[in-house]
Image (tube, helix red, strand yellow):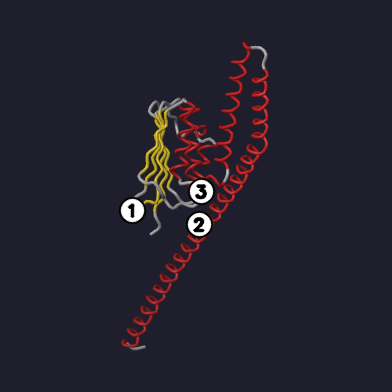
């Protein structure tokens, strides 16, 4: 083999080697890209599956609340109404003046309980949520809580009407109820502050805080079913969820749903 042929052979060998190396590099890059796309697809499917599960849980939960609401109205409500009539009759027929005041007090308690029961029944049914604006729904919850005189709840918002479907209104109302109930039961707070606002890039942002004793969010016992429910509800619609708490300062909840670009 001559010198020229040797040089050509070396050049060809180097060329084939380079081409082979490039082909291997392209194959590895394509393999990694396909693997990344596959993993992303799996992750997306898992996320969709989780949202479907959470959505199903919400539907089951909502159906249960509807049934409870109807049962409260149709069964217990009717019985309380009957008791109220009996007490009114007792008051009318009472021959002992000393007992009149006590019977009247019992009548007032029953009537107030009946009114509270009807209000709760409305809150648990779809019609109440579907027909009213979210600010009215939250304001009703605020008024009901303030009537208990256990703590002072204030509510502010930067809109009167917002085009929200049932799922969003239900989520905002239930989370507000959950936070208020937790604060009253556990935080020993004097005040609860609620704000619901919208802006150019944010469909809505719910912020709730109390001035209670706070808790350690890293402890498992702090992550009760109430907090889990709030997180799950936010995840259903893809909202950002942030809960912060500081001992002897209070607890702050922020849930934000950005507008789709």
Q: Nearer the viewer, residue 213 or 46?
A: 213
**Image quarter hosting the C terminus:** bottom left
Q: What is the C-alpha distance between the residues marked 2 and 1?
A: 30 Å
- Residue at image position (47%, 64%) is 37
- Residue at image position (66%, 34%) is 76
Give the mark nearer the N terminus: 3 vs 2.
Answer: 2
- Helix, strand or loop status at disc 2: helix
User: For the residues carrying marks 2 and 1, which lies nearer the camera in this image?
Assistant: 1
Q: What is the C-alpha distance between the residues marked 3 and 2?
A: 37 Å
Q: Nearer the viewer, residue 221 or 151?
A: 151
| Crowd tier of the residue under label 2, counting other residues whose Cα lies within 10 Å: few below 14, some 14–19, many 20 or above | few
| Crowd tier of the residue under label 1, counting other residues whose Cα lies within 10 Å: few below 14, some 14–19, many 20 or above | few
Quick check: 202 above or below 195? below
Give the mark nearer the N terminus: 2 vs 1.
Answer: 2
In the picture of the structure, the residue carrying the numbered disc 2 is 43
In the picture of the structure, the residue carrying the numbered disc 3 is 131
- Residue at image position (51%, 50%) is 166
> Which x, y percent locates residue 124?
57, 41
Q: Nearer the viewer, residue 191 or 211?
A: 191
The numbered mark at residue 200 is 1
- Helix, strand or loop status at disc 3: helix
Q: Nearer the viewer, residue 204 or 136?
A: 136
Quick check: 231 above or below 258? above
- Helix, strand or loop status at disc 1: loop
The numbered mark at residue 54 is none
> Which x, y percent locates residue 154?
40, 34
Q: What is the C-alpha distance between the residues marked 3 and 1?
A: 26 Å
- For residue 142, what is the image quadrant? top left
Check contact, mark 3 vs mark 1: CB within 8 A.
Answer: no
Quick check: 17 above or below 215? below
**Image quarter hosting the N terminus:** bottom left
> Which x, y percent locates residue 170?
51, 46
């Amino acid at each position: 083999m001559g010198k020229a042929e040797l040089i050509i052979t070396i050049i060809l060998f180097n060329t084939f080697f380079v081409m082979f190396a490039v082909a291997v590099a392209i194959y590895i890059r394509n393999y990694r890209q396909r693997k990344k796309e596959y993993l992303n697809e799996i992750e997306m499917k898992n996320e969709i599956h989780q949202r479907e599960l959470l959505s199903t849980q919400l539907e089951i939960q909502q159906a249960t609340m509807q049934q409870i609401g109807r049962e409260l109205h149709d069964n217990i409500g009717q019985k309380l109404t009957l008791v109220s009539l009996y007490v009114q009759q007792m008051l009318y027929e009472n021959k002992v003046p000393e007992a009149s005041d006590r019977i009247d007090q019992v009548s007032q308690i029953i009537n107030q309980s009946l009114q509270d029961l009807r209000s709760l029944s409305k809150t648990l049914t779809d019609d109440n949520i579907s027909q009213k604006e979210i600010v009215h729904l939250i304001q009703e919850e605020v008024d009901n809580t303030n009537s208990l005189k256990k703590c002072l709840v204030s509510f502010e918002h930067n809109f009167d009407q917002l085009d929200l479907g049932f799922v969003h209104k239900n989520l905002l109302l239930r989370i507000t109820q959950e936070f208020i109930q937790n604060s009253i039961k556990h935080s020993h707070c004097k005040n609860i502050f609620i704000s619901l606002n919208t802006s150019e890039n944010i469909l809505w942002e719910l912020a709730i805080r109390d001035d209670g004793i706070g808790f350690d969010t890293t402890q498992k016992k702090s992550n009760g079913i109430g907090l889990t429910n709030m997180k799950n509800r936010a995840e259903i619609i893809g909202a950002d969820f942030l809960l912060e708490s500081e001992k002897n300062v209070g607890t702050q909840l922020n849930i934000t749903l950005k507008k789709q670009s």
